[in-house]
Image (spheres, rainbow, N blue to C red):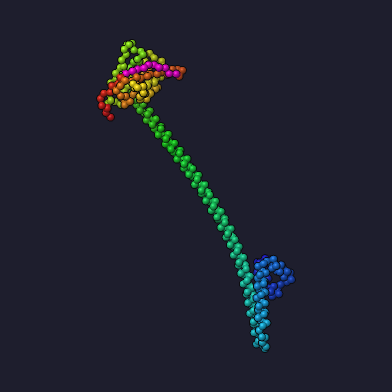
């Protein structure tokens, strides 16, 4: 037996009025013994009925037909009041149980919402950390690519300059020619003077190979009187007749003595010295853009 069955079949009212069957009385009393709330309601109802009976017993009993009708009306009113009180108590009890059930359900839903909010917060935090790591990695990649692009642009610029000088050297006849110091027939060898006009950004020198034209390719290095290398080493040169022609930047040279070292690459991959070519450079004129 549960509270829904008690409420639907009016067990409380029928129990107090003596309208229950024996088996219903047994079930009802077993339920009330096991339910503290119902026992408390039953005690309250019994105390109320005892109070009504005590008040009715202490009043003077009138005589006559009129007084008997008043007593009957009073008993009816008392029964109605008792019935209303019992119904109100039962309604209040069930209402309290419903409110407690709704409160517990609300607490459970709040706990679920709090857990869901915590999961979303942790997921958002993890996503933010992953995004920052991805941004840092992307920034490092961009910086690396930018550095590579800048290096390649410098290489391309240098290649363009060198290519332009080589093209200019092939397009024009070499204005200057030098012979190796070791192959000179004169004992008192004097370096050849090269009068370099500064109106041009580059110039060419033809180095006589004196028959050493069988090597795969040639490299030319320029050094000043202090032994410091000037301009950049020129490699990948091939003979043009008995000479090898090499272009140079005019801005790399000042007035003074210079020597040029020519080397050739042999078939076995080693380098062979071809000769040393001394000269004196004299700059003339004013450089124009």
Residue at x 33% of width, y 21% of height:
225
Using residue 221 as the reference point, say whether residue 137 is left or right of it.
right
Residue 115 at x, y percent in the picture: 56, 53
Can residue 241 be seen from the camera position used here?
no
Using residue 36 as the reference point, say whether residue 248 is left or right of it.
left
Using residue 206 as the reference point, say whether residue 42 is left or right of it.
right
Residue at x 64% of width, y 79% of height:
78
Residue 172: within the magenta? no
Q: Nearer the viewer, residue 59 or 148?
A: 59
**Which corner quadrant holds the N terminus?**
bottom right
Q: Quadrant of residue 230?
A: top left
Can residue 3 be seen from the camera position used here?
yes
> Which residue occupies the extreme front position in the image?
226
Note whether 143 is above or below 56 in the view shown.
above
Note whether 147 is above or below 276 in the view shown.
below
Residue at x 28% of width, y 21% of height:
282
Q: Quadrant of residue 215?
A: top left
Q: Which residues are magenta?
A: 270-279
Residue 153 at x, y percent in the picture: 39, 32
Note whether 87 is above or below 117 in the view shown.
below
Residue at x 49% of width, y 43% of height:
133
Considering the whole magenta stretch, tell me its main secondary structure: strand
Note whether 42 is above or below 246 in the view shown.
below
Residue 88 at x, y percent in the picture: 62, 72
**Which corner quadrant holds the C terminus?**
top left
Residue 274: within the magenta? yes
């Amino acid at each position: 037996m549960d509270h829904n069955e008690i409420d639907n079949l009016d067990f409380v009212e029928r129990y107090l009025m003596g309208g229950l069957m024996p088996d219903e009385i047994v079930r009802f009393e077993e339920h009330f013994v096991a339910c503290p709330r119902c026992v408390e309601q039953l005690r309250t109802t019994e105390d109320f009925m005892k109070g009504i009976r005590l008040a009715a017993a202490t009043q003077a009993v009138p005589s006559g037909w009129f007084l008997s009708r008043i007593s009957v009306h009073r008993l009816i009113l008392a029964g109605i009041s008792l019935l209303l009180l019992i119904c109100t108590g039962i309604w209040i009890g069930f209402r309290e149980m419903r409110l407690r059930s709704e409160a517990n359900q609300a607490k459970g839903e709040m706990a679920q919402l709090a857990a869901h909010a915590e999961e979303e917060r942790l997921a958002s935090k993890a996503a933010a950390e992953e995004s920052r790591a991805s941004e840092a990695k992307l920034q490092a990649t961009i910086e690396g690519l930018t550095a590579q692009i800048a290096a390649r642009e410098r290489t391309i610029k240098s290649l363009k300059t060198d290519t332009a000088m080589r093209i200019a050297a092939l397009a024009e006849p070499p204005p200057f020619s030098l012979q190796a110091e070791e192959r000179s027939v004169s004992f008192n060898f004097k370096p050849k003077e090269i009068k370099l006009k500064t109106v041009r950004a580059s110039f060419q020198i033809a180095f006589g190979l004196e028959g050493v034209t069988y090597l795969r390719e040639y490299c030319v290095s320029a050094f000043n009187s202090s032994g410091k290398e000037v301009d950049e080493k020129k490699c990948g040169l091939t003979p043009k007749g008995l000479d090898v022609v090499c272009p140079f930047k005019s801005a790399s040279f000042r007035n003074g003595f210079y020597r040029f070292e020519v080397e050739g690459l042999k078939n076995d991959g080693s380098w062979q010295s071809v000769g040393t070519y001394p000269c004196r450079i004299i700059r003339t004129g004013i450089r124009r853009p």
